[in-house]
Amino acid sequence: MSNEKAELERCFQKAIDQYADMVYRVAMNQMKNKEDADDIFQEVFIKWVQHRNEFENSSHEKAWLIRVTINLCKNMLTSSWRKKGTEWSEEIENTLVHEDKIQEESPLSQVLEQLPENYRIAIHLFYYEELSIKEISQVTGEKESTVRTQLTRARRQLKKLLKGVEL
Amino acid sequence: MFQEEYKKYYDDIHPSAELIARTKKRAMEMCEEKSDDKDLENWETDLLENLSAEKDRKWWKIAGSMAAGLVLVVSVGYLIHTLQPMKHQTSSGNLAGEEQAGTVSGSSVRGSGIKNGRISDYVDSSAMSELANTERASVTLDFASEQMVIFHSNFGVVMYKPQEQVIGYYLRGADVYGADDWKEYRIYPTLDGQLLYIVKKATQEAWCYDYSDSSYTTVNIDEVWTKNLYLANNKVTGTKADLYREDSTQSILIQVDSNNYTQLVFLVPKSKLQASLAIAQYNSKTGQETCLKILGQYGWSALTKEESTNYENYMENQPLAFIHKDKKNHISNTKNSGKPQTKTTVRPTESPEATQLKDGDNNLTDNPEENAVTEAPVSSEEPVQPIETNLPEVTPDSTTFG
């Protein structure tokens, strides 16, 4: 095995240890299903391999990974074949009863699913990754005021849906 | 309470071991593909060296043969005149022939098996194209939006305004990199392209070029990472099939928005000169494409000669003026159509505090759109008018915090 490959393996493993869960959770947050999140996860780390030498520090790397994950999710969500696929699956969904699915899903996930993608990511980065509004703004590429509005509106919706839960 | 519940919910979400293994496998495969490409390049270099050695050996053979011939003539003459009775018994030709044969077989033949000098006999045409691209791909596309395209190489940094078809600014390589190799530097434009950070990787020194006032100042490296930088994840690297021209430079296709792509291409595939560098813009929705010859018909020399430097000895006899379509495009006219009116032409030494950047330069759009890359048809080589569209701002691709 060449040194270069061994070095890549080592770096890759380190990145996986550090960021795999974070990337996967962001992907799940956006895509809402395991299959798509799996695809996104793979693509993100393939891109990471391509750009691994460009990171200046770990916070840069982390921000980049979140950003790329969000971008790839957006790409997938807006791609035409997916839109078509979603239309079909909605039609199929209407004809089937998913009792198992309903039982499996927690109330929180059901509530989160009702939020728009940009609200969901703002909530996730704020509550789970514990980023500040400024950091969320940098990562998502949105204005701080926009992030603040998204968070406020998301909280308002969540409060309504979760019936008075403290946020 | 919500946060705890939220965390608890997401704590249970992990990528499967199988997914990680699959991802790792793909990553390693990709790495191997890249290293195969490198091997091919090395092999090409070896081949060229061997061919050069082969040429040298040919010259030695010719020189040896001539020397042997001369010795033969002198010997024969001497024998004729001095040893007339023995002339029919001497075979000096055999002696010379043996020496020559010895010269050939005795030389160390590196890369034996190469019989002639044409590389194309040993490399198929697609590999040739790849190698040619690698050789010429020494230009990096740093930024692309509807309004501006920024790229850099050893000649410096160029910002081109595709809508107006003029060079916005040109920072000379000598001023940007000094005596260093240009590859030691990274170029980081901000999301709006207005600020350009130039970072020397080894020393973590940083400079900022502000397009709004053409200032070129030293900045603190930490400041760079707090900005909303336009980084690489909108660059579509992928496989060759992702690039929509075979003779394009490598890895420098940028997705500008959901439908538009910008790429640097060389319009003369076989030439190693960068004179034919052009910007290709492709709209996947309308299928319309635009090809802008950055330097018109004059090539880099027009630009570099203007700056009293010679680049690749290209078109020595061309006039100095760089004229794209009309007089206003002359590179030395104004900031928007020529070289930047930099406050400093060499590395400035001001303190970072004295050159604080303005907040609000990096305002972002609210809803960035991005889409998957699609293959596009081959662009025409003639420049055409750019597409007039009202596309959204460029989406940010990578940022940092902390």
Image (spheres, coloured by chain):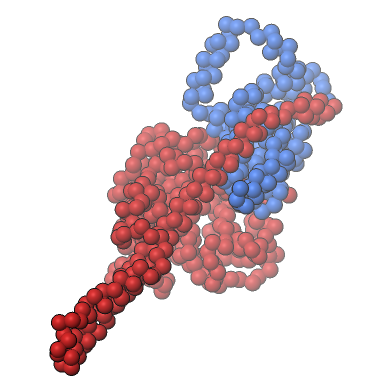
In this view, B87 is above or below B25: below
At 54% from the left edge and 52% from the top edge, which residue is drawn? B193
Q: Is residue A96 visible?
A: yes
Q: Which chain is red?
A: B
Q: Quadrant of the N terminus of chain B?
A: top right
Number of disc labels: 0
Residue at image x 76%, y 17%? Answer: A107
Location of residue A15 with respect to B132 vertically, above or below: above
Q: The chain shown in blue is which?
A: A
- The quadrant holding residue B60 is bottom left
Residue at the far right in the pictured view: B1
Left-right relation of B47 to B195: left
Residue B247 seen: no
**Who's the residue at 61% across and 24% down the image?**
A35
Task: Examine the rendered structure and indicate whether residue B99 appears above or below residue A91.
Answer: below
Q: In x, y percent, where is residue B319?
A: 30, 69
In the image, A8: left or right of B29?
A: right
Quadrant housing residue B59: bottom left
Nearer to us in this view, B316 or A124: B316
Q: Position of residue B39 (x, y in %)?
A: 48, 52
